[in-house]
Amino acid sequence: MQTEDYWYPFYYLDSDGNLSGIDIELGRHIASQLGVEAEFIRTASGHETLAENLSAGEGDIILSYYSYSPRRASQIFLSRAYLTERLSVLVNTQLFEEIKKNDPEMSVEEAFETLNRPVVSIMTVADTVYESLAKQYFPNARVTAVDSTEEASRRLVQRTEEAFFLNNLWTESFLVRNTSLLLHYSLYLLPNEDQIVIGVSQNNPELLEWINRFLSSEYNRTEEFVSKYIDFDLVSKLYDPVDKKEEILLVGDPYRWIILVLLIVFSIVVVHNSQNKLRRNKSPEDIPHWLLNIWTILFSMVLGFYVGGAFPEIIDFLSPIGTLFFNYLLFCGLPILFCVVTLNFLKLIERSDGARFIKRFAMVMIFFFVIGSAIGLLTELVLKPGV
């Protein structure tokens, strides 16, 4: 027994109009092992009515991408899982970035908690275990259940949904066929598992025992059927980070080392000759230290650019030193520079009898600052922009 709606790649019509998919192949294989012919009954309107139809005697087993749930286990017998997948959420990338904007270090788990808000709409498929799970995991969000996977696919392609909740196998198969959506959506796996099982009527415990033994035996070809319909190499690329850093070398080995040595030797020669020239033309007290030589500074810049492009692996090692130097400039260098410039400017003003002009200018600036602040405060209190 299966639902009326198709669930690619588990049961669907291929290009020739034939019923195909993982569950179709598995059903025919089980039937052949039992020595009978498989007949697929597709009258159930949704997954939640399959158990009732089976108990009413419409078929022998449910093989319809059927997830385990305690409620279903109380209605019919459920076999051991022939597929174990992870629950997943497909999230609009822009929404996820807005969620993490206030806290860039937020973990994925913490970000998922922020999806549980009334302003977030999470889509899933109606009459499935995923509808109840979505309401359980995101009780405060707006859970929207569509009638079929075809409708879910259409809405995702149109990019009208903020998030989509299902298990990873179906969602991965959908993304592989619609790779352009990876620019707009990101797939995240939840730690919770989704067990896909076979349903058997409670009037037929012998069949349940046989199916469990079959699924545990070497005759079970489920992995072969799954690999036939799902390209796992393409699926693995879905999880490659979009912002993955690729190291592009200016020069490859061994030439980057040869050029580095030549640059160092050339810079040493030029700086040494420059210092000798200064010694011949200037007195000893006027000769700058070789570290302050203009050629030393220029070659340091050139070597820095070259090492950064030819030896990117050294960047992580040296970055703490650069961060320390930059923080030093912010903490000490810039305040000292500001104080020196300000004090010298004030001395110049005082000597040129411009103190009265500075006082007037400061009063005018303070006056307009007060007026501007008052306008902004009144605008916020009266007009309330953004509300």
Image: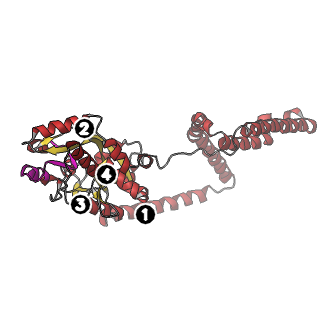
Q: Left or right: 47 with respect to 221?
A: left
Q: Nearer the viewer, mark 1 or mark 3?
A: 3
Give the percent coordinates (x, y) of residue 267: 80, 38
Say which mark, if any, is on residue 361: none
Q: Residues within 10 Å of mark 1 (few under 14, many from 20)?
A: few
| Amino acid marked by disc 4 | Trp
From mark 1 to mark 3, how far is it between C-alphas?
Answer: 60 Å
| Amino acid marked by disc 2 | Leu
Lower sequence index among marks 2 and 3: 3
Residue that mark 4 sits on: 170
Point 10% across, 54% down: residue: 58
From mark 2 to mark 3, how far is it between C-alphas?
Answer: 29 Å
Q: Which residues are magenta?
A: 50-70
Q: Nearer the viewer, mark 2 or mark 4?
A: 2
* Element under disc 1: helix
Q: Which quadrant does the C terminus fall into?
A: bottom left
Q: Which picture quadrant has residue 280? A: top right
User: Is residue 148 something one can see in this rendering?
Assistant: yes
Lower sequence index among marks 3 and 4: 3
From mark 1 to mark 2, how far is it between C-alphas?
Answer: 79 Å
Residue that mark 2 sits on: 215
Judging depth in this view, the residue of 306 and 156 nearest the camera is 156
Judging depth in this view, the residue of 76 and 271 nearest the camera is 76
Q: Left or right: 118 with respect to 235?
A: left
Give the percent coordinates (x, y) of residue 211: 19, 39
Lower sequence index among marks 2 and 4: 4
Lower sequence index among marks 1 and 4: 4
Point 12% across, 54% down: residue: 49
From mark 2 to mark 4, how far is it between C-alphas?
Answer: 21 Å
